[in-house]
Amino acid sequence: MPSNVTMPSDAAARITAAFAEQIGPGRFHLWFPPNAQLSFFDQTLEITCRNEHFRDWSRDQFGEALLAAAKSVAGNDVVLRFRVDAARFEDREGVEVDPQLKPPQAVNLFGERDLPPKPKREAVPLRRFKSLAEFVVGVNNRVAAAAAQAVLDEPGLGPNPLVIFGPTGTGKTHLLEAVAAGLKTLAPKPLFLTAEEFTHRFIQAARTHKSSGFRRNTRAAGAFILDDLHFLANKRATQEELLHVIDSYISDGKPVVLGLDTHPRLADELLPELVDRLLGGAAWGLLPPDDQTRFDILRAKAVPPIADEVLKHLARSLRGNVRELEGAVHSLRHYAKVTGEAVTLPIAKDVLGDLLRHTVRAITLTDVDAATCKTFRLSAGSLQSKARTLAVTQPRMVAVYLARRHTAATYGEIAKHFGVRQHSTAVAGEKKVRMWLQQKSLFGAVPAADVIARIERELFR
């Protein structure tokens, strides 16, 4: 028993042990030592509680388990009695404790009581990088994961730099951390930074006139890995410094891996020279996971396991990013730990009710229109114009494709909204975009799939 429990009889100790084993040591130590004390006399198991709220809650949640534990030790004629005594928990000096458990009182050479030494501050654990083995591979991220593995297999020999891009919560940071963790055997070790950290170090070095030391440190690693490159948008001086860092690593044959939220060609806030360097290597995108990949992710995160029926329902219902899936699993796991109940489908629907309701959002034709115009930098109403230039007709076909994919509108409604003459024109536009995707066609220098992914990110923002 913990030291704050009244010194129990042998029967009380055995009842406590049986009860803790029945509900699990974790749940017992979470709820009972801070809030309740057990004692046993005259075939009565008395549970003294801190307050009325815990008395009522513990009676409902653990009454049967307490009675069963008491009967297993003292026979079937045991009764329970719950009472409240807040003073017992406030005045710790009045609680009887086993004398052998009391530490001796420290005194100095003059016989005076010494204050207890200050506890040593625990070291803050270092950041744990995720590994490539933990990354759940699906159709949405297979090529990017293979590119990250290639960096580990042959550092610096493949396309350099490697750019991994995609919307938030699709696994960019996971892959970058996996590369950093896998390259730790290099001498010297790799340097992993976020763009924010890089910016902070660069500014501090400039302010303290230590730019030479900054440049020496950032160029001395065995590999350079930078996350959230889009943070440097419109920071010209920092981008110029980063450009020199990348050039240094590439010229030395050291791998450079960068994370970005969009294809480099679409990153208009970056310097043209920096974009040119990024395009000189390889750029692979990550897309939001499909149903099967979401299910695989949920199953990998669900420790201890959760029934497949529950995970499949979540995979169909939660169409956000991976962090949303992780949050759902954490919520269910916490509920199971607190209540001791197995997670069933009805329980999951009840626990995650708000989250599941808020994932349903109706996309309208106006939303698709606005997102497409913003991505292609067209003015509002451009898709309804009579212009027949590629600058308008191609975005219009993309908008038709996305309208069919994300709205319940008919071809006729879509044709009317975008000002085409008949619904057959809308049908032809959708087929054209599907063909672009199958043939991996380009819009300028950017794959059609990447352009559509960017519009969808804007659509669901």
Image (tube, rainbow, N blue to C red):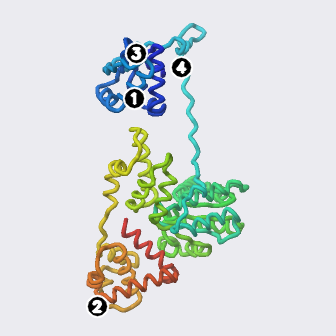
| Disc 4 residue crowd, few under 14, some 14–19, many 20+, Cα 10 Å | few
Disc 4: which residue:
116
- Quadrant of the rendering where the C terminus is positioned: bottom left
The answer to which of marks 4 and 3 sits earlier in the sequence is 3
The answer to which of marks 1 and 3 sits earlier in the sequence is 3
Element assignment for label 4: loop
Disc 3: which residue:
40
Along the line of sight, which residue is nearer the eye, 187 or 61? 61
Disc 1: which residue:
65
Tag 4 and tag 2, C-beta contact below 8 Å: no
The answer, for residue 236, to whether it is visible in the render is no
The answer to which of marks 1 and 4 sits earlier in the sequence is 1
| Disc 3 residue crowd, few under 14, some 14–19, many 20+, Cα 10 Å | many
Task: Tell us which disc is closer to us: 1 or 4.
Answer: 1
Disc 2: which residue:
421
Image point (36%, 21%), residue name = 47
Tag 4 and tag 3, C-beta contact below 8 Å: no
Along the line of sight, which residue is nearer the eye, 178 or 204? 178
